[in-house]
Structures are given as structure tokens and as C-alpha cells.
Image (spheres, rainbow, N blue to C red):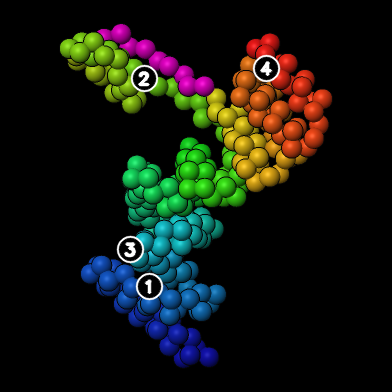
Amino acid sequence: SFGLLTAITFGQKKQLRVAEKALKKSQYSVALDAVNSVEGMLETMDSKYKSKYYFLKAQALSGENKYEAASDAFTSLFDFEIEDGSSKYSKQAKPMLNNLIQKVSSKSIEQYNSKDYAAAQVNFYLTYILSPKDTSFLYNAAISASLSKEYDVSLKFYRELKEIGYTGINTQYFATNKETGVEENMGSKIQRDLMVKSGGYTVPIEKVSASKQAEIVKNIGYILVNQGKTEEAIVALQEARRANPKDVNLILNEAQLYIKLDQMDKFGQLMQEAVKL
């Protein structure tokens, strides 16, 4: 009935107001409880309240450091408002999501630098999930997982990198410090050009990094070797060798695998190849 619907709507509004007030006081768990209390009514919720629900939920989850769930709530908000033809909360939410990504990526770098590789891989991967265009975070997650000896996780990440065609190629912008004579990485083209213009730097150059694709295939091979998956490892190392025919270590590692398989003829062939290099 109309009376019941009015009462439900009033209840929803009231709980969303509670959440809003709690967020202003940074009482994130209170805000989350209030938002969660109306979750069951989401299907019947008026569209303007539904947008607000996602917006408040995303903020409460961010405050509670539940980054992945917060990202899902932000995504739900963006998707819903696109569908609804509105952008009331999305405009405010986008910078909030960017701050969240910055927070998680900074944490992952901090953890990596302090050698907490297990925690770093989680947050590097989460940064990639939050911002899929930043594929270098997936690469960092793979390295960190390998360093923390989580080989199954590392293998999953390396395979994902291979699947998306990650190359890791980037351009670095250098200039020479006039005072010290040392060539320095300036971070960006704009920064480099500004420093050269200011007169403190000279000889602006650009360096393009090598592709990491062969290294990714090689790492897949090495992890499979560690896991005792000899035949799969051979396939991966052969693929890596096609990309790096002059890498002696790849030949020697593949040769070692043939000893395990008791295929001494193939071992001998590879050792001869290695000697020729």
C-alpha cells in the first residue's frame, strides 16, 4: 500500500542521513552499518536514493580501508548513474576513487621497499584491479609474489601479463645536471624540458626501455621448473628462447630439464648450442 511504501522510503532516507552524518565525523563503521541496513531494499529504492546509497557506501568502505569493496561500490555508482542518465554523485566520486588508488599504490610501494613482499603483491594487484590501465602494477605484483615465494600467485599474474600483451616499454626523459655533470632521469618530458629551459640542465635525451615480454615467458618457465612441471616448463623456455636466442642461461636451464626427463640426446644438443654462443 501507499502508506507502507512511504514508511519504507522514510526509513531509507533516515538511514542514509545517519550514514551521511557519521561520514562527516569520520565514523566509518557507523556509516557502513547504516548503509548496510537498507541494502535489502535496494531493488525497490528510488533512483535518487540508490545513487546516494552507492556514494555513501563507497566512502564508508574507503574509510574502513576495505579498498576492493569500496572500488566495487564506486563502480556500481558510475554504472547506475550512466544507466540513469545522471551524474550527480559520480562527479564527486571520481576524485575520491583517484585518491583511493593513490593510497593503495603508495602503500604497495612502501611495503615493497620495506621488503614486505607478501603484502606488497596484494596491494600492487589491488591497484591494478582499481585502475586496469596501470598494467605495470600487475607486473610489480608478479615480481613481489615471486619474491615472497608465492609461486602459484606469481604464475597467475605472469600468465595474465602474457595474455594482455604487456610489454613494459616506456620512454624515460634524461638531462645532464650542469653543476655535477651527472645524467638524471627527470620523470617526464614536461619536467625535463622545464629544467633544460631554466638553464640548470643540458643535453636532453630520451631512452626507450626494452620489452619485458621475453622475461615474462622466461619467469613462467622458471616457476614451472620450481614446481616440478618439467614438460610445461620446457614449452615456456622454448618460447622464451625464440624471443632471446642468445640467452645462454635459457639454453642451460632447458638442458637441465632434459636430464630430469632422461633425454640425454636433447641435453647434448643444447649443450653444443650453448658452447657455440
- Given the image, on which type of amino acid does mark 4 rest? Ala
Q: Looking at the picture, does residue 276 appear above or below residue 43?
A: above
Which quarter shows the C terminus?
top right
Q: Looking at the picture, how far across and down is residue 265, in whole percent?
A: 82, 25
* Callout 2: SS: strand
Q: What stretch is highlighted in magenta?
A: 201-210
Quick one: label 2 or label 4, which is nearer the N terminus?
2
User: Residue at coordinates 46% horizontally, 19% vertically from top-left?
Assistant: 208
Q: Mark 3 and mark 2: span between their CA atoms?
A: 37 Å
Residue bearing the label numbered 3: 63
Nearer the N terminus, badge 3 or badge 4?
3
Residue to which mark 4 is pinned? 274
Q: For the residues marked 3 and 1, what is the alpha-carbon distance in whole angstroms?
A: 10 Å
- Tell how many labels: 4
Q: Distance between the residues labelled 1 and 2?
A: 45 Å
In three-dimensional space, the C-alpha distance between marks 1 and 4, rounded to whole angstroms, equals 62 Å
Judged by depth in the image, the label closer to the viewer, 2 or 4, is 4
- Determine whether label 2 and label 4 are within 8 Å by CB: no
Left or right for 24, reference 239: left
Say which label, 3 or 2, has the lower sequence index.
3
